[in-house]
Image: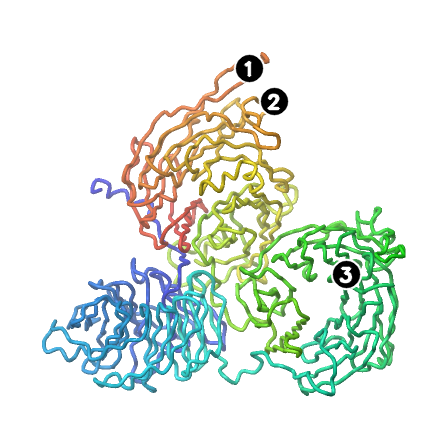
Amino acid sequence: MDALEDYVWPRATSELILLPVTGLECVGDRLLAGEGPDVLVYSLDFGGHLRMIKRVQNLLGHYLIHGFRVRPEPNGDLDLEAMVAVFGSKGLRVVKISWGQGHFWELWRSGLWNMSDWIWDARWLEGNIALALGHNSVVLYDPVVGCILQEVPCTDRCTLSSACLIGDAWKELTIVAGAVSNQLLVWYPATALADNKPVAPDRRISGHVGIIFSMSYLESKGLLATASEDRSVRIWKVGDLRVPGGRVQNIGHCFGHSARVWQVKLLENYLISAGEDCVCLVWSHEGEILQAFRGHQGRGIRAIAAHERQAWVITGGDDSGIRLWHLVGRGYRGLGVSALCFKSRSRPGTLKAVTLAGSWRLLAVTDTGALYLYDVEVKCWEQLLEDKHFQSYCLLEAAPGPEGFGLCAMANGEGRVKVVPINTPTAAVDQTLFPGKVHSLSWALRGYEELLLLASGPGGVVACLEISAAPSGKAIFVKERCRYLLPPSKQRWHTCSAFLPPGDFLVCGDRRGSVLLFPSRPGLLKDPGVGGKARAGAGAPVVGSGSSGGGNAFTGLGPVSTLPSLHGKQGVTSVTCHGGYVYTTGRDGAYYQLFVRDGQLQPVLRQKSCRGMNWLAGLRIVPDGSMVILGFHANEFVVWNPRSHEKLHIVNCGGGHRSWAFSDTEAAMAFAYLKDGDVMLYRALGGCTRPHVILREGLHGREITCVKRVGTITLGPEYGVPSFMQPDDLEPGSEGPDLTDIVITCSEDTTVCVLALPTTTGSAHALTAVCNHISSVRAVAVWGIGTPGGPQDPQPGLTAHVVSAGGRAEMHCFSIMVTPDPSTPSRLACHVMHLSSHRLDEYWDRQRNRHRMVKVDPETRLFLLQDSGRILQLLAETFHHKRCVLKVHSFTHEAPNQRRRLLLCSAATDGSLAFWDLTTMLDHDSTVLEPPVDPGLPYRLGTPSLTLQAHSCGINSLHTLPTREGHHLVASGSEDGSLHVFVLAVEMLQLEEAVGEAGLVPQLRVLEEYSVPCAHAAHVTGLKILSPSIMVSASIDQRLTFWRLGHGEPTFMNSTVFHVPDVADMDCWPVSPEFGHRCALGGQGLEVYNWYD
């Protein structure tokens, strides 16, 4: 390597890291967060704006930050300056910082000190620092000189899993060490008779049956809390630990986590714990759970901090997210379920149905036909009416809108519907609509202008009633406007309805799972300009026969558009119109985004809810513009936020099979249900708004499997992206153009995420996440990149088609459109439309269950994408590779006066490469594609044009680049850390076909071939040929290496250590001459590098 020291260009520098947050500390109204070796500084002053004010890069070198310790000041003032010790793994660095008036300056920084052992805790002692090391020893360190003043080991030199240092001076210093024997060892380093003389433990505390990961000591109350692998938190009464020989008592054994507990912190009135189950629990000192914070995803919460004066808890997770939660304590009103005590001698009968009229009025009906009202504020029941026609079977629905509009509707098994004004029940109006049972009721509200009631009767007939009020407000008028007829099905009734703005159409869902579009009034489609293409022959009166024995015929308007069985056999549960889209939910565990074009319903996107939530009951748009999903998870009712992946509310109600109702206003959220013959009510103040602040959105909950850059968007000055760096803090080159790279990442958490990476701010913004896959997403491809409006009318933004593939042999094709939007933090908005999907289960079944015999089949498959991706069809396949296929890569060959040809390269676990000429195969009347064995099966690709044994084991990375000579550079990286580079020539030979016509057939051959056996120390998972002279590779050994090409064997230029563990994929691209190149690395996190040309 000495001879190559002159090759220092290009040198990659890290500009962005998204890694698990492993350290948090509140310092005054500032928050320090450790992410890898970087420190993020947040301003938590709510008098101004909540924002990040600085990212200090690479503060701890190649170590991960695990903690911060701030030196106490005599006057206690840390608002302007602070001396902070940052430690993690075996590294320690001391920094003096100034952060007044929203600015951040680094006044002084010590060297990076490397200890001989893992640092578990640090504590300031009169200007020096005491360190608790990994094999039960304590070091006194001088941060100014940078030397060890004293080191004292314990006689029990066991490996520690945690430690806590207590005391403000060396003479009173106490260490509580968590040993791998599941014991706590308490000993005093100052009692050593001489330097390096071991000290025996003063006390041994036993109780946990697993490794102790964290501990916290509260001196004012003499309490010690410990968190363990056994999923429990223990509270110990230890008194003053600085005094030897004290008594220890276990006063609390807290079980609340479902997995290992990583962190614990004692506050004056609370105990905070967080663990592998991604839940942060707030306990009382007596062991009672007061609050549960859920929102992080992935493998757990790694760091917690607290601000007692502001009553904040801050959590950092494996998903790179940082969240701030508010402590509310015991006296918080509205949490929990209360029984409304309906059972009474004055109220005979059994409850049959319940509904909510707003968040403070509740209606219930009994099997005696009595309708009751409960006022939450007054806390008393009142009977409104009693009608014997509504005994036994009765439906009950309250009108939507603020506090229910004061109306409710009842229906019985004899076709009768009663509309009841809640304030004046004597003015109720009855109508008999059908000769048989009313199957369902639903309301449709258009602002404050129009209110409709839809009732489903026999034979799929839906009666549409128009409700209006008298000017005095004391009477209502009910008029039948029209009737609709549902498509034939076994369970033929509607389940929900809503007006489609501006109000010309009604969107309905039915029990069959279909979504239907009806005109909101008769004769609407005759109006010019209404309905578009739907006016031609749609919505005309149709005749259907009833289900009664008399064979009565009903006439009703048919739907103008239908999406049959969209939600499967379980039915549609809700319809919501917002922002020009229609959102539907169903009991298939999915929610759809639809839009209406030319009077026709068209699906845009299908999304899954959280894992295990298979019964979606509704969807709400909350005041901040975000969406929440209502549904049932086993026996719990859940309000789930798909953006933050958080269960906002959880009610253990027993399931959704019984009568229930939900209401949400800005003031409060309410959920009522029947259980044990009584009405149960859950109320939470603040409605469904987010009860916390997201300082930074999480990215993925599991490892990133692939990274793909889509394109670049240029934002003008009017769309300036705010930067958290001050102008004088910008590093050279970071003041590049206002360019934003759009990158797609896929993960084992089954999601595909679209990211915006501005070149000027060093930040990342998650624009949207697609959650269609049922298993991990392993591959992604992008094509058809353009601009909104197309070539004829280009507009700002970017469009592209994306195909993602993963586990369970599942593929999805969707399109994305990224446009400028000043209202979002990223100044961009992303719209996704799902186009098609494909699963190979049926085909595999025809192949004698081949997928059950091997984990990954050795097939290479060729799909056709037709109609702009709306049709995804399996065309051909090959079993040429006898081992699992790990990578495929397509490239084109262009030569003067020759046809452009498409080539495919596949790589397998046996280290072999195969090249296929797809152009010849796809030619009309081509004989290269062999016919299928059985009808209905795909073609067979036949023999490849070239095979090559490049490596001795699996190939994990593959890339090609055309050269000026018309050849192709091909590079591959293997599991043994080797690289293989060769020059591929494509020569066109003349061939006389059987029919007598002359054709050109390509012949592939290798001109030059080179190997680098030990290029990396582990799997090479990323590879990119930047130019005919430079190649970059990335490996699990966490090194990004540049290689010089074109002079024989690839030669080493330089290498940079990155911080993403288990890197799985890499993508590199040029940005601009001013900014150079960017490189994104994905694994257990995401890191973006750049280098200049």
Mark number, residue 925: 2
Against 870, residue 296 (above or below) is: below
From the viewer's perspective, tell me whether residue 972 is left or right of residue 390: left
Secondary structure beneath label 3 = loop
Q: Position of residue 565 (x, y in %)?
A: 70, 51
Q: Is residue 141 visible?
A: no
Secondary structure beneath label 2 = loop
Identify which residue, 1084 or 182, lies in the foreground.
182
> What kind of residue is marked 2?
Asp
Alpha carbon distance from label 2 to label 3: 53 Å
Labels 2 and 3 touching (C-beta < 8 A): no
Against 144, residue 426 (above or below) is: below
**Closer to viewer: mark 3 or mark 1:** 1
Disc 2 residue crowd, few under 14, some 14–19, many 20+, Cα 10 Å: few
Q: Position of residue 433 (x, y in %)?
A: 87, 65
Q: Is residue 950 visible?
A: yes
**Closer to viewer: mark 2 or mark 3:** 2
Q: Which residue is mark 1?
A: 993
Instruction: Tell me the residue at 70%/50% (across/down).
Output: 602
Q: Position of residue 540 (x, y in %)?
A: 86, 51
Q: Position of residue 168 (x, y in %)?
A: 25, 81
Alpha carbon distance from label 1 to label 2: 12 Å
Quarter of the view holding residue 681: bottom right
Identify which residue, 790 or 927, lies in the foreground.
927
Q: Tell me which label, 3 or 1, sits earlier in the chain.
A: 3
